[in-house]
Every structure is written in C-alpha cells, then in structure tokens.
Amino acid sequence: MTTSAGTIPGAAPTAPPPASALAVQSHGLTKRFGRQLAVDGIDLAVPRGSVFGFLGPNGSGKTTTIRMLLGLIRPTAGRHSLLGLPMPAGAAAVLPRVGALVEGPAFHPYLSGAANLRRLDAADRTADPGTADRRIGAALERVGLTAAAAKRFRAYSLGMRQRLALAAALLAPRDLLILDEPTNGLDPQGTREVRGLIGELAGEGVTVLLSTHLLAEVEQVCTHVGVMHRGRLVAQAPLPELRARTAARARVRTDRPDEAARVLTELGLDRVEHSAGTASGDLGDVPPEAVVVALVGAGVPVRGFAVATADLEELFVSLTGEGFDVSG
Ligand SMILES: Nc1ncnc2c1ncn2[C@@H]1O[C@H](COP(=O)(O)OP(=O)(O)OP(=O)(O)O)[C@@H](O)[C@H]1O
C-alpha cells in the first residue's frame, strides 16, 4: 500500500503548514541516474524546529535526496528551498546557516582532529579568524573529542571520525542541520552521545533533518518522520499523529468465532477475521466495552477479550511492504 506524500493512510488530509514555517520544502524533487529513478517526485515538508527522521531501507533514495537538498547534485526535475530561500539561487545566503553531515568531509589523515577543523574553519570566509580557537574548542567539546583533539585523524575510530564530521558541521551556529545516517558505525555509547547531542541542538531551536534506516532512532529522537520507499515519499507526518493511526485491534476468544465475527462486523469493526477459537477486528472508533456488551447480548460465549495496538513498525511495514531494522 502506498499513499501520496504528506498524508497518512486513512487520515483526512490536513492543510500543509505555510512555507515560512518550513525549514526544508521540496516540490516534485526527482533524480534519475540513467534509467534508474532514484528519487521520484518527492514533496518534503520539514517544519522549523522539528527533528525530522528521513526513514527508509538502504537504497530507497535518502542520500540522493540529501545531496540534492544541499546542492551537491543537480535534480533531474523539481525544486526546493532551505530556510525559506529557493535553492540553488539562495545557496550563498543560506548554506552558511546549514550544517551538513554527508559522506563525511575530506579530512586529512596525517593532521589531528583539531588541525582538520582549523583547515575547514579557515576555508569558511564568513568565519572570524580571531575566534577560530574558541569555535574549534567548542565544537570538539560538543562531540566529546576534546581528549582526542591532538590525535591524528588516521588513528581515529569510525565513531570518532563520525563525531569529528559532526564537529565540522557545528563550527558555526546553524539554523538547520542535515545529517545523513549520523549514528552509522557508532558503538552504543557513541550512538547515545550523538542522539543526545541532536536532542540538545533541537532544544536550542535548530531544525534537524536526519536520515536513518533505524526505526528505533526515529522513535527515540524525532518529532516528525518521512518514510521513503523505492524513491518515493510514502508518508510524512508528526510522529504522534502516526502513532494515533496505529490501529487498535480487538481479539475475542470464543467457541463460536464465526458468530463473534458477525457481531464485530455489525458493530462496524474493520478487517474482521476469524479462525479456530478467535475472531478479531480493528476497533476504529468503537469502544472495546461496546464490543463485549454486543457479544454477550448476542449470546456469544466470550472466553477471553484483548485489545492490541499495532506498533509503528507494523505501520511502516504496511506502507512499504518491507521490514525495518529495529535495533539500535
Ligand atoms: N551516482 C549514482 N549513480 C547511479 N546510481 C546511483 C547513484 N547514487 C545513487 N544511486 C542509486 O540510487 C538509489 C538510491 O540510492 P541512495 O544512496 O540515495 O539510497 P539511500 O536510501 O540513501 O540508501 P543508503 O542508506 O544505502 O545510502 C540506489 O539504487 C542507488 O544505487
């Protein structure tokens, strides 16, 4: 099952927020590599102040989208804006306010972490050289690399490299951070630290767009989610709205499952099924107690009754027909 972007299956379409409220907005953004459609006409709407999880399995088009957003590759079709400014026309004005982590910046292997940041800082024409030390120190401190500041980059672990890349993204104050798989390759401790850092930055009002293939990451740090599947944005919504859509399902244990199923259908439950000893259906707006009353009233012997709520993973699987990594 797929839905058009910006909607949730079964939900009434809501009016999109005004453009000024969006940190990232795209219309029909498309990228084709030869015959392959990597990104297929997506309409992203990332609200300012949100932590937006751009979720999808490997190869679903997340990195390609992020590269287009940052102006690293040219879209085949479509348009987009960052912080309200159209790209690429507004790039010079907007990109200094955008920190990015995408396939790591090119760090010099024989220079220390601090020296690498110094090179990147020096390349930023908007940065005051007089305050470089303070900026670099603060960025290293933020990502927990102060103790390893003088170590050569080539001696850094994958996690330290990832954190240095984050430090580079944080050298200047940012309004928007675009992070491609920011916890990829990190150990559990590093993962916790990076997620904590994202939470801190969000608390300071920075909008964060992060791509991930980990549903748990979205559940832990994100306020919004956009789900990619084969180049298409199959859903995007605030996380609480998606959770509210996860259907509650009533399950009755009974000797007369066919009769129970008939009662559930008459009450208006959806997707009613029955098998040996059980009948079940999606409750929708029907209160569970009304189901029990109706079953007893119809003379159905109720041996057991339970209400189970589908989790987000089940919802996403129903959207994409694929599982997600739930670890991490
Ligand atoms: N430069 C390129 N040339 C040809 N095909 C590409 C190129 N970049 C990406 N693709 C293809 O586009 C599709 C989307 O890739 P993309 O890297 O955007 O997905 P992803 O969701 O970020 O996955 P991953 O997490 O593995 O990076 C893939 O099938 C990929 O092989």
Image (tube, rainbow, N blue to C red):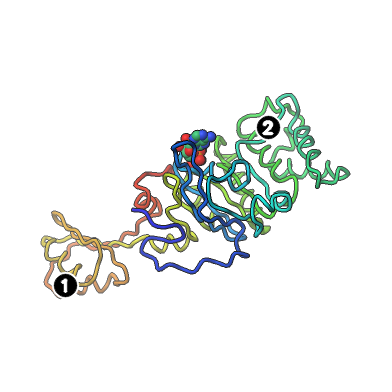
- The x, y position of residue 202, in whole percent, is 63, 56
Name the kind of residue labelled 2 in the image: Ala
Disc assigned to residue 296: 1
Q: Which mark is residue 188?
A: none
Q: Are marks 1 and 2 in contact (CB under 8 Å)?
A: no
Of residues 119 and 15, the one nearer the viewer is 15
Q: Which circle's residue, 1 or 2, is located before the other in the chain?
A: 2
What secondary structure is marked by label 1?
A: helix
| For residue 153, above or below residue 208 | above
User: What amino acid does circle 1 point to?
Assistant: Val
82 relative to 273 in the view: left or right:
right
Circle 2 crowding by C-alpha within 10 Å: few under 14, some 14–19, many from 20: few
Does the closest atom of ligand 1 sit within 8 Å of the Cβ of label 2? no
Q: Quadrant of residue 255?
A: bottom left
Give residue 307's position: percent from left, percent from top.
30, 62
Front tag of 1 and 2 = 2
Residue name at image x 71 percent, y 41 percent: 168
Q: Label 1 to label 2, Cα distance in Å?
A: 69 Å
Quick check: is the Cβ at mark 1 less than 8 Å away from ligand 1?
no
- Looking at the image, how many numbered discs can be counted on the residues? 2
150 horizontally vs 258: left or right: right
Instruction: Left or right? Give the position of 159 relative to 5.
Output: right
Which residue is label 2 attached to?
106
Of residue 37 and residue 7, the one placed in the foreground of this image is 37
Whether residue 131 is visible to the viewer of this picture, yes or no, is yes
Please give the name of the residue rendered at 73% of the width and 49% of the height, measured from the top-left corner. Answer: 92
What's the residue at 73%, 53% (across, down)? Answer: 93
